[in-house]
Image (cartoon, rainbow, N blue to C red):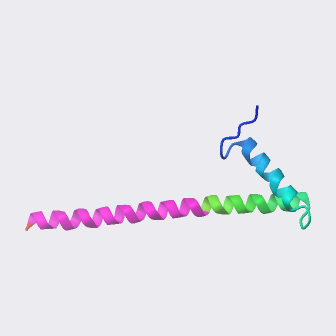
Amino acid sequence: MANTDKFSVDYFKEALRVHIEKSKDVLNPVQAANSYYRSVVSTIIHDHLNKNFELVRRIRNLDEAYNNVKAEYQK
Protein backbone atom coordinates (compact mmCIF):
# COMPACT_ATOMS: atom_id res chain seq x y z
CA MET A 1 0.00 0.00 0.00
CA ALA A 2 1.31 3.44 -0.94
CA ASN A 3 2.15 5.99 1.71
CA THR A 4 0.08 9.05 0.80
CA ASP A 5 1.26 11.19 3.73
CA LYS A 6 2.19 14.64 2.58
CA PHE A 7 5.88 14.77 1.70
CA SER A 8 6.31 10.97 1.64
CA VAL A 9 8.21 9.37 -1.24
CA ASP A 10 4.98 7.93 -2.63
CA TYR A 11 3.27 11.33 -2.41
CA PHE A 12 6.06 13.00 -4.38
CA LYS A 13 6.22 10.19 -6.94
CA GLU A 14 2.53 10.62 -7.66
CA ALA A 15 2.83 14.41 -7.78
CA LEU A 16 5.73 14.13 -10.22
CA ARG A 17 3.74 11.78 -12.45
CA VAL A 18 0.75 14.13 -12.42
CA HIS A 19 2.96 17.13 -13.24
CA ILE A 20 4.66 15.23 -16.08
CA GLU A 21 1.27 14.24 -17.51
CA LYS A 22 -0.10 17.79 -17.26
CA SER A 23 3.02 19.22 -18.92
CA LYS A 24 3.37 16.64 -21.69
CA ASP A 25 2.32 19.08 -24.42
CA VAL A 26 5.12 21.54 -23.66
CA LEU A 27 7.86 19.64 -21.80
CA ASN A 28 9.43 16.22 -22.10
CA PRO A 29 9.16 14.07 -18.96
CA VAL A 30 12.62 14.94 -17.65
CA GLN A 31 12.07 18.66 -18.17
CA ALA A 32 8.70 18.45 -16.41
CA ALA A 33 10.21 16.50 -13.51
CA ASN A 34 13.02 19.05 -13.22
CA SER A 35 10.52 21.89 -13.26
CA TYR A 36 8.45 20.29 -10.50
CA TYR A 37 11.54 19.47 -8.43
CA ARG A 38 12.93 23.02 -8.63
CA SER A 39 9.54 24.48 -7.81
CA VAL A 40 9.07 22.32 -4.70
CA VAL A 41 12.62 22.89 -3.45
CA SER A 42 12.22 26.64 -3.95
CA THR A 43 8.93 26.60 -2.05
CA ILE A 44 10.42 24.60 0.83
CA ILE A 45 13.38 26.97 1.10
CA HIS A 46 11.12 30.03 0.92
CA ASP A 47 8.81 28.61 3.62
CA HIS A 48 11.78 27.82 5.83
CA LEU A 49 13.21 31.32 5.44
CA ASN A 50 9.84 32.90 6.20
CA LYS A 51 9.46 30.77 9.33
CA ASN A 52 12.97 31.72 10.45
CA PHE A 53 12.22 35.39 9.82
CA GLU A 54 8.98 35.12 11.82
CA LEU A 55 10.80 33.42 14.71
CA VAL A 56 13.47 36.13 14.74
CA ARG A 57 10.79 38.83 14.67
CA ARG A 58 8.96 37.24 17.60
CA ILE A 59 12.17 36.90 19.62
CA ARG A 60 13.09 40.53 18.91
CA ASN A 61 9.62 41.67 19.97
CA LEU A 62 9.81 39.58 23.13
CA ASP A 63 13.26 40.95 23.88
CA GLU A 64 12.10 44.55 23.39
CA ALA A 65 9.00 44.01 25.54
CA TYR A 66 11.09 42.32 28.24
CA ASN A 67 13.61 45.17 28.30
CA ASN A 68 10.86 47.81 28.39
CA VAL A 69 8.95 46.16 31.24
CA LYS A 70 12.14 45.40 33.13
CA ALA A 71 13.17 49.07 32.83
CA GLU A 72 9.77 50.15 34.18
CA TYR A 73 10.31 48.12 37.32
CA GLN A 74 13.89 49.25 37.81
CA LYS A 75 12.92 52.93 38.05
Left or right: residue 9 compared with residue 22 = left
Q: Residue 41: image x %, image y %?
A: 68, 59
Q: Nearer the viewer, residue 64 or 3?
A: 3
Left or right: residue 30 compared with residue 40 = right
Q: Residue at x 75, y 58 (%)?
A: 37
Q: Residue 67: image x %, image y %?
A: 22, 65
Q: Nearer the viewer, residue 75 or 44?
A: 44
Furthest residue to the top? Answer: 1
Q: Residue at x 89, y 65 (%)?
A: 27
- Magenta residues, dominant SS class: helix
Left or right: residue 28 compared with residue 54 = right
Q: Quadrant of residue 24?
A: bottom right
Furthest residue to the front? Answer: 22
Q: Taking 14 as reference, is 68 above or below it?
A: below
Q: Nearer the viewer, residue 3 or 71?
A: 3
Q: Which residues are magenta?
A: 46-74
Instruction: Quadrant for the N terminus, please.
Output: top right
Q: Nearer the viewer, residue 74 or 37?
A: 37
Q: Residue at x 83, y 51 (%)?
A: 17
Q: Residue 66: image x %, image y %?
A: 23, 62
Instruction: Quadrant for the C terminus, please.
Output: bottom left
Taking the magenta stretch, the answer to whether it contains residue 58 is yes
Q: Residue 23: image x %, image y %?
A: 86, 62
Q: Quadrant of residue 5?
A: top right
Q: Residue at x 57, y 60 (%)?
A: 47
